[in-house]
Image (cartoon, rainbow, N blue to C red):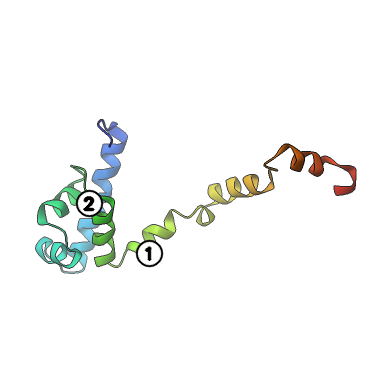
Amino acid sequence: MVTRRSPARTMMLAELGSNIARWRKLQGLSASQLAERAHVTRDTLRSIETGTGAPRLDSLLAVLTSLGMANTVIASTDPWNSIAGRTLMDAVLRMPSTASQRSAANHPRNS
């Protein structure tokens, strides 16, 4: 468990929470309605929306699912969905993982 938060992390949690609250309001849901749909307590939802406390990851996912956002959030973490991620994945996939593979990759017949 993280015991200290950096100012940047605190700001990101607050921004994420604000975005979730905005989506809830855009969908015309009260906090109580969303908490009930997500099967979380009102206090848990409040901590998610304010970016405070330490709600469980499955609680956050339940809220995102109830808002219809879970798949979008999950897809945004896929390395293949960003230029930086694809570049890193391409570099890793091209890198031989053992000495024998590196030797084989450098062999003249493999060029």
Residue 40 in the figure: left or right of residue 62: left
Residue bearing mark 2: 18
Residue 106 found in image quarter: top right
Q: CA distance from mark 1 to mark 2?
A: 19 Å
Q: Is residue 20 visible?
A: yes
Label 2 environment density (alpha carbons within 10 Å; few <14, some 14–19, many ≥20):
some
Q: Secondary structure at mark 1?
A: helix
Q: Secondary structure at mark 2?
A: helix
Question: Disc 1 residue type?
Answer: Asn
Q: Give 19 or 86, whichever is nearer the viewer.
A: 86
Residue 111 in sight here: no
Going 16% across and 69% down the picture, which residue do you hit? 28
Q: Which mark is residue 71?
A: 1
Which numbered marker is on residue 59? none
Q: What is the quadrant of residue 45 in the picture?
A: bottom left
The residue drawn where x is 60% and y is 47% is: 87
Q: Is residue 51 above or below residue 23?
A: above
> Residue 98, percent across and down?
70, 40
Q: Residue furthest right?
A: 109
Name the residue type under label 2.
Answer: Ser
Identify the residue at horizontal 30%, vertical 68% (top origin).
68
| Image-quadrant location for residue 71 | bottom left
Residue placed most toward the observer, 79 or 41: 41
From the top left corner, tell me how far across and down residue 15 is, in percent. Answer: 27, 47
Q: Earlier in the sequence, mark 1 or mark 2?
A: 2
Image coordinates of residue 47 in percent, x first then y, are 16, 48
